[in-house]
Image (cartoon, grey):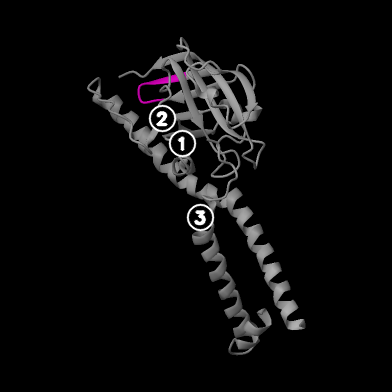
Amino acid sequence: MRAALRVVCELGVTAGIVLLMLCAYLLWGTGSYTERHQRVLQQQFEQEIQEIHQKQGKRSLGAIKLGSAVALLRIPRLGADYKFAVVEGVDAEALREGPGHYPGTAMPGKIGNFVVSGHRTTYLAPFNGIGELRRGDDIVVDTREARYTYRVTQKEVVLPTRLDVIEPVPGHPGERPKQALITMTTCNPKYSASERLIVHGVLADREKRHT
Amino acid sequence: MYGFIWRRLPGGIVVRLAVSLLLIGVVAGLLWYVVFPWLATRVPIDQPW
């Protein structure tokens, strides 16, 4: 009896320690995975831009492959070194590598809604701080052809079922877009997936790369 | 359980301590690099899509 109880206790304590380790892994361990992929993605992207510069006009942009970087995202409010390569796709695999562009939504700078999703607390938590953004804050999106600067217009917290926030005109399904918008989505509250935090922005500035 | 393992370990206290630490390290490594990455894709926290 005693021995059996002891085994149960030891297993319980062990399970507790393993669970704590799992939490630690989710919060910090997952970041190293993202960090590795981000380093490669950002390097590739910057190299491609370099090559476009050198080719002088003979550039062929080509279709973006699923899983390769679409753009570089910078948000000055979240720090001068805040920089993430945005991947194409929003499945679990893509989002482990960085914030992901919803396939089918507008490309950066184009009329419509450029929708980007990112993790809030795990995998380097790229969108951890987007709740701190205020109206008028810059969201800088570098693509191969230009730098687009969006300004934050509004934030909202919605249920995961509110898919209309990613429509070309958010909240108005089926309407024809006239503006170039950006929408960032992440989990809310932190450490949960019960709601979504949504940040909308509108294109304010476009700066062509000199080629 | 741990007492049983401890008694089964060979050698004196130093060797036993060393082997214990090694075993803990192996188990922790397996969890961190194999089990947790697999599990992480199945835990429904922080799924922003």
Are the residues under marks 1 and 2 on the same chain?
yes
Residue pictured at 40% horizontal, 42% vertical: A40
Q: Position of residue A15 (x, y in %)?
A: 66, 65
Crowdedness of circle 2 by 10 Å Cα count: few (<14), some, many (20+)? some
> What residue is shown with label 3?
B37
User: Which label sits in the foreground, 1 or 3?
Assistant: 1
Contact, CB < 8 Å: mark 1 with mark 3?
A: no
The quarter of the picture where the N terminus of chain A appears is bottom right
Foreground residue among A160 and B47: A160
Report the number of discs: 3
Q: Position of residue B23 (x, y in %)?
A: 56, 75
**Label 1 vs label 2: CA separation?**
8 Å
Query: Against A192, is A72 above or below?
Result: above
Q: Amino acid at mark 1?
A: Val
Q: Amino acid at mark 2?
A: Pro
Q: Which residues are magenta?
A: A143-148
SS under mark 1:
loop
**Mark 1 falls within which chain?**
A
**Mark 2 falls within which chain?**
A
> What residue is shown with label 1?
A90
